């Protein structure tokens, strides 16, 4: 795995109480020079609008630093939230970590 790729694995419910902590972790990754950040949602059971807002703000931060943000392993609830808000067109989403790793091998 490329050392410039930071993997973040939130867990449980991604809502207002965890959103600022989540954003802070992404901001720190950007400040440390991560060229790409993968957020692996395999352990996230639910995400509300606060979690989605934190994700959108994080995407802006990552893009401002000329880095990339990727998501993988989203569950059906998060997938539905993304589709209802059209965020599925904004984020690069992989089915799982293996699919992400395979895509990154070509880079």
Image (spheres, grey):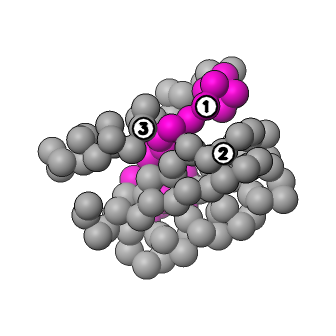
Are the two marked residues, 1 and 3, in contact with CB atoms closer than 8 angstroms? Answer: no
Does 40 sit left or right of 5 as displayed? Answer: right
View extreme (bottom): residue: 32
Q: Position of residue 75 (x, y in %)?
A: 61, 31
**What secondary structure is marked by label 1?**
loop
Label at residue 34:
none
Which of the marked residues, 2 or 3, is nearer the chain's N terminus? 2
* Residue closest to the eye, 84 or 103: 103
Are the two marked residues, 2 and 1, in contact with CB atoms closer than 8 angstroms? Answer: yes
Label at residue 96:
3
Q: Position of residue 93 (x, y in %)?
A: 45, 35
- How far apart are the alpha carbons under marks 1 and 3? 11 Å
Per the image, the residue denoted by label 1 is 75
- Residue at coordinates 43% horizontally, 78% vertically from top-left? 32
Q: Is residue 68 on the magenta stretch?
A: yes
**Span shown in magenta:** 59-80
- Residue at coordinates 26% horizontally, 61% vertically from top-left? 1
Label at residue 44:
2
Q: Where is residue 104 in the image (x, y as percent from the top left)?
A: 24, 47
* Residue closest to the eye, 104 or 85: 104
**What secondary structure is marked by label 2?**
strand
Dividing the picture into quadrants, the one containing residue 33 is bottom left
């Amino acid at each position: 795995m490329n050392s410039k790729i930071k993997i973040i694995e939130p867990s449980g419910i991604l809502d207002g109480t965890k959103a600022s902590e989540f954003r802070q972790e992404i901001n720190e990754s950007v400040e440390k020079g991560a060229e790409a950040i993968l957020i692996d949602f395999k352990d996230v059971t639910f995400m509300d609008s606060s979690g989605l807002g934190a994700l959108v703000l994080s995407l802006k931060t990552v893009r401002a630093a000329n880095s990339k943000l990727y998501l993988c392993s989203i569950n059906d609830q998060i997938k539905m939230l993304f589709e209802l808000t059209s965020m599925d067109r904004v984020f690069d989403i992989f089915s799982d970590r293996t699919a992400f790793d395979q895509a990154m091998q070509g880079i």
